[in-house]
Amino acid sequence: MTTWLDEGRAPAILDYEYHLLHPITVSGLVSAVVEINRTQTIGRATIAASGAGANELVAAVADKKIYVLSMMLIASGTVMGVVQSDSTDLTGWLTLDAAGAGFILPAGAASDNYYFECDTNEALNLNLSDAVYVGGFVNYLQY
């Protein structure tokens, strides 16, 4: 995988921790060869939340955290929601003010770009203010 770094747009190869391996400076640009040693699989969960209160999106796994890489939510009616790590708010209350209202959090350029991080041993939840159907998906890592 080739990544562009900094304003100089220098290609770089990164290890799993995303540190440069053997950087070389050429004409003021930094370049290196990239190796990725990834063992995680990106998970994808369908969102089909409809109950007032906490709706589990991704179940907790022992000794692991959930990292949200991308998400899409679309409401069937007016409702407010908050994304949570179990019962701890990860966002403020989000107002979806009509049928078809929603949002997309697109995937970042690198897999270490995530929107939310759940605490260890905690599920990813969507807490809804009312019993209004909210659909979508979430892409995530667990490690």
Image: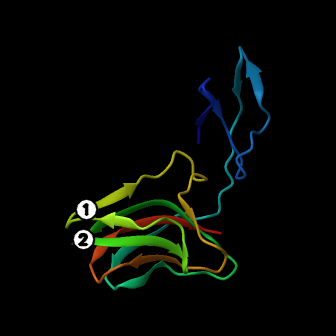
* Residue identified by numbered label 2: 78
Type of the residue with mark 2: Thr
Mark 1 touching mark 2, by CB under 8 A? yes
Q: Which residue is painted at 58% across and 81% down in the image?
A: 60
Q: Which residue is painted at 33% across and 65% down in the image?
A: 95
Indicate whether 58 appears above or below 101. Answer: below
In three-dimensional space, the C-alpha distance between marks 1 and 2, rounded to whole angstroms, equals 8 Å
- Side of 7 relative to 95 (left or right): right
Indicate whether 8 appears above or below 51. Answer: above
- Side of 119 relative to 104 (left or right): right
Task: Please provide percent x and percent y for residue 82.
Answer: 44, 71
Task: Please provide percent x and percent y for residue 105.
Answer: 42, 55
* CA neighbours of label 2 inside 10 A, class few (<14), some (14 to 19), many (20+): some
Furthest residue toward top: 27
Secondary structure under the numbered disc 1 in the rendered image: loop
| Dot label at residue 101 | 1
Q: Which residue is painted at 65% across and 57% down in the image?
A: 38
Q: Which residue is painted at 34% across and 71% down in the image?
A: 80
Image quarter of the N terminus: top right
Task: Please provide percent x and percent y for residue 76.
Answer: 22, 72
Task: Please provide percent x and percent y for residue 43.
Answer: 50, 68
